[in-house]
Amino acid sequence: MAAHRSGELPEGLSWGPACAAGIGSRIPAATKGLRVLACVDGSTVAERALQDVLLFLHADRHDALLVLHVSEAGHVPSSRAHTPEHLLVHYETSLLARSGVPYELVHLVMARGHTDIPAAINAVAKAKSVDMIVMGSYGLSRHDRTEELGSVARQVSETCTALALVVKHTAPRTTTEPVSILACIDGSALSLDALANALDFARPGDKVIAMTMPSARETRDSIEATLAPARELAAKFPAVDCEIAVNTDAAGDAPGKRICDFCDAREIDFVAVGSTGLAASLASGPVTTLLGSVGKWVLLKANCSVLVVKADHRLRSAGATATVVHAALRWRKKAHLEAHPEEL
């Protein structure tokens, strides 16, 4: 795919008539908060994804939401209810207009033969300078219901540079219903970013759990080196109910499985993980892995919604103080493990 400047689209993609008609377009020119791209296709899980992300966005924090529908040029939907114009108006009238969050409705048209939907979504995310992409775990056209995750959600989560939230549930959630958010910490900068985002998203009544899973070889000092930055970070958000947890269950199991088992046992609603873990942060050369083995396991196997935190993203202004914490403290764990490589 050819490179393109912000606001432009690569060859084979164009803004559709639903955009040109100016439906929505209520985002101020200067948005200081999070810019979130929600991908919709008329499926139930896509609508739940849109509902869930609205729980965490706030007009008074200058957040903004872009709702994206992708269609192929010349494609005729099976019913009028699935036309881009009808779908976007449905989301506007049923959810967006009463949310109070500035929003824009975006229709992207792919030329005939252009079938790479994940690349198209990433192109829109770049053109619109978004900080987070939200999508359902599978789409309207899904045929194989035995798969844990659809190909579009999987590829976008792996390849995007923004935060990626994959919503997996189909049951409706009320706006006042408290949720639980698990952040998995291992002493790496990205794991602290995951915790910072969990703390930043939490509303009054929500529960955040910062959990580390030490191996059988880790010493008490090593575990404390992981927990200390998390405690200091949580202290930056005094209004949030945050539990610091050390999970020693099934220490011999794969880390991804241990995380998923913890989510099931504690009935977690959202789990936040870094795209790569401590091993990548200790690597001497550039990290080429898009999504590490633990993040991939959790993304595929978790029964709750998953937030994948990438290196190339910015926190909302209210959570930016978190960077002060982990920038100074992330080396504590690294220095300890460099001195004790046997604990890796």
Image (cartoon, helix red, strand yellow):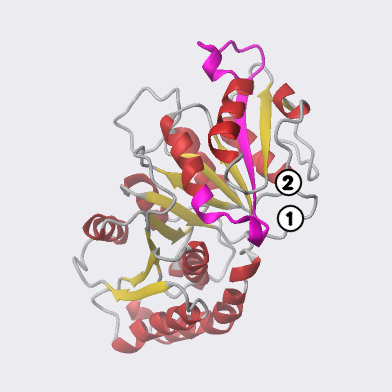
* Quarter of the picture holding the C terminus: bottom left
Residue at 59% from the left image edge and 21% from the top image edge: 86
Quarter-wise, where is residue 252 in the image?
bottom left
Per the image, the residue denoted by label 2 is 27
Is residue 316 left or right of 219 when viewed as pictured? right
Q: Is residue 96 visible?
A: yes
Residue indicated by mark 1: 31
Q: Amino acid at mark 1?
A: Thr
Q: Nearer the viewer, residue 168 or 256?
A: 168
Q: Name the side, left or right, on which 55 lies relative to 105.
A: left
- Element marked by disc 2: loop
Q: Position of residue 84 (x, y in %)?
A: 61, 22
Q: Assess disc 1: are there few (<14), some (14-19) or many (≥20) residues with their C-alpha within 10 Å of its C-alpha.
A: few
Of the pair 53 and 252, the residue shown nearer to us: 53
Mark 2 to mark 1: distance in Å? Answer: 8 Å
Residue at image point 71% right, 49% down = 129
Provide the residue span drawn in magenta: 54-83
Q: Nearer the viewer, residue 264 or 236?
A: 236
Q: Horizontal and vertical percent for residue 69?
A: 60, 30
Q: Residue at x 34, y 72 (%)?
A: 212
Q: Amino acid at mark 2?
A: Ile
Q: Is residue 296 visible?
A: no
Q: Is residue 236 above or below residue 184?
A: below
